[in-house]
């Protein structure tokens, strides 16, 4: 334990368990970085400590390690509680009975010889998943990703954005069209590929999605799937005020029965803390000209021309101006025409940077465009696509006229004549989504996001020497 430091709250141990993963495929400890709770009193472990390796595997250990190294901020009890909830689920999944510490004495590491030939087939007991919800920038996605990456390889797992997941479901449904129960077939496919589904940004806005979610997830849960999801709102507020919402309500009850609902109450927006000015967002007079100059810098002066992007089932999306992984568009070309997540997904697969001219302020008159823009930002954020744009105002100002029902201005005789109230969009879905979108647009200007973009598109971007 040479890494022990006096006053440290924990000790980082590195131990390669040679061959252990072959003998005990369910241990989840092979060649992992483990964090053990040690020196609870603030003192280093004594040299006479017994020869016992004490491990803390899972998201809680990695979370503690990152905080100790300064990679994550300390002092947020709400994040601490959330990571503990994820740790409890992790422990249940790997059969630790909810105990986050695994004490394996070295003399007991070798199993009995005959037990190697007497294993019973593994069965999946019912396990309740976790539904994380809270305000924007509170670390929901970061903590879910922590959980996902810490799961051992023997647990099949998938991490996907809600939009991409539903696109995949509809694509699979097309394949099973004409069968007796297409949704059951889709569920069989999904559960044959994954045991744990990590679903980011659960936000139901499409009536076609809303009508199939209950039957789909009923099949999935019956087949042993464990769901971990993030959202900006609690289950009872999903698809709020949506068409035929009464048919959606059984899904809410199913979700609450199959997942522990955990609210993250932190008021800190970590994305805003990371945002720095990078010269990717232009407003005011001359914004369009500045954007054009920026685009020319990005493509190195190369000529830009039309490119057709493959979407789904032979459909193509035409980008009028593109070069060297940069797509240059006007706002109306992507958000004022009937496009959706599938189109934006194809766009992000083919371009590392989207330059968008003329993003307007949103209100009642362009509510539909606002919905598409929110979806576009969600897909871009998920793929770490870079945004460079000119806009009517700051990200916050773009959504000033979008409010939830609870925050809608009260109508009075004096106010009814005011023209500034005429274009206010009172819309719960868009009103809740705007906070996430503003936060993500700000993060997209940060140095950290630029680094994420470079890593995600390293196959497209020129290498730095």
Image: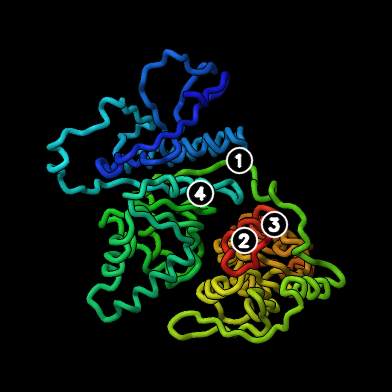
In the image, taking residue 329 as reference, residue 317 lies left or right, namely left
Residue identifier under label 2: 453
Q: Residue at x 56, y 66 (%)?
A: 379
Q: Is residue 26 visible?
A: yes
Q: Dot 2 lies on which element? A: helix
Q: Can you tell which of label 2 and label 3 is closer to the viewer?
A: 2
Q: Which mark is residue 442?
A: 3
User: In which quadrant of the rendered view does residue 197 lie?
Assistant: bottom left
Disc 4 crowd rating (10 Å Cα; few below 14, some 14-19, many 20+) is: many
In-front residue for pair 24/143: 24
First reached walking from the N terminus: tag 3 or tag 4: 4
Tag 2 near tag 3, CB within 8 Å:
no
Residue identifier under label 4: 133
Q: Can you tell which of label 3 and label 4 is closer to the viewer?
A: 3
Q: Which mark is residue 71?
A: 1
Tag 3 near tag 4, CB within 8 Å:
no
Mark 2 → mark 1, Cα distance in angstroms:
19 Å
Q: Can you tell which of label 4 and label 2 is closer to the viewer?
A: 2
């Amino acid at each position: 334990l040479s890494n022990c430091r006096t006053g440290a709250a924990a000790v980082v141990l590195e131990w390669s368990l040679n061959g252990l993963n072959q003998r005990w495929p369910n241990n989840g400890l092979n060649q992992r970085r483990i964090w053990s709770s040690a020196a609870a009193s603030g003192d280093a472990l004594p040299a006479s400590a017994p020869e016992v390796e004490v491990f803390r595997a899972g998201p809680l250990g990695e979370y503690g390690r990152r905080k100790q190294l300064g990679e994550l901020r300390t002092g947020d009890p709400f994040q601490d509680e959330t990571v503990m909830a994820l740790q409890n689920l992790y422990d249940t999944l790997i059969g630790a009975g909810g105990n986050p510490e695994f004490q394996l004495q070295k003399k007991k590491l070798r199993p009995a010889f005959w037990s190697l030939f007497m294993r019973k087939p593994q069965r999946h007991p019912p396990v309740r998943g976790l539904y994380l919800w809270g305000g924007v920038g509170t670390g929901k996605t970061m903590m879910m990703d922590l959980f996902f990456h810490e799961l051992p390889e023997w647990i099949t797992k998938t991490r996907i954005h809600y939009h991409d997941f539903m696109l995949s479901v509809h694509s699979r449904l097309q394949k099973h069209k004409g069968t007796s129960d297409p949704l059951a077939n889709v569920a069989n496919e999904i559960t044959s590929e994954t045991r744990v589904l990590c679903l980011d940004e659960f936000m139901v806005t499409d009536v076609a999605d809303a009508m199939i979610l209950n039957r789909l997830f009923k099949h999935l849960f019956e087949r042993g799937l464990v769901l971990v999801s993030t959202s900006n709102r609690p289950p009872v507020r999903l698809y709020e005020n949506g068409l035929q919402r009464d048919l959606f309500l059984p899904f809410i009850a199913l979700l609450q029965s199959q997942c522990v609902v955990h609210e993250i109450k932190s008021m800190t927006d970590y994305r805003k803390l990371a945002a720095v000015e990078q010269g990717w967002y232009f407003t005011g007079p001359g914004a369009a000209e500045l954007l054009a100059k920026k685009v020319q810098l990005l493509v190195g002066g190369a000529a830009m021309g039309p490119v057709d992007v493959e979407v789904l089932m032979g459909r193509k999306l035409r980008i009028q101006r593109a070069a060297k992984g940069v797509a240059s568009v006007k706002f109306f070309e992507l958000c004022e025409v009937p496009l959706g997540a599938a189109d934006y997904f194809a766009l992000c697969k083919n371009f590392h940077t989207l330059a968008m001219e003329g993003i307007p302020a949103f209100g009642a008159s362009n509510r539909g465009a606002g919905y598409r823009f929110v979806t576009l930002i969600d897909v871009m954020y998920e793929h770490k696509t870079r945004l460079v744009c000119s806009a009517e105002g700051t990200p916050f100002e773009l959504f000033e006229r979008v409010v939830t029902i609870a925050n809608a201005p009260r109508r009075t005789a004096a106010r009814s004549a005011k023209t500034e109230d005429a274009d206010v969009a009172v819309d719960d879905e868009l009103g809740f989504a705007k906070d996430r979108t503003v936060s993500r647009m700000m993060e997209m200007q940060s140095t950290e996001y630029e680094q994420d973009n470079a890593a995600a598109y390293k196959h497209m971007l020129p290498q730095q020497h």
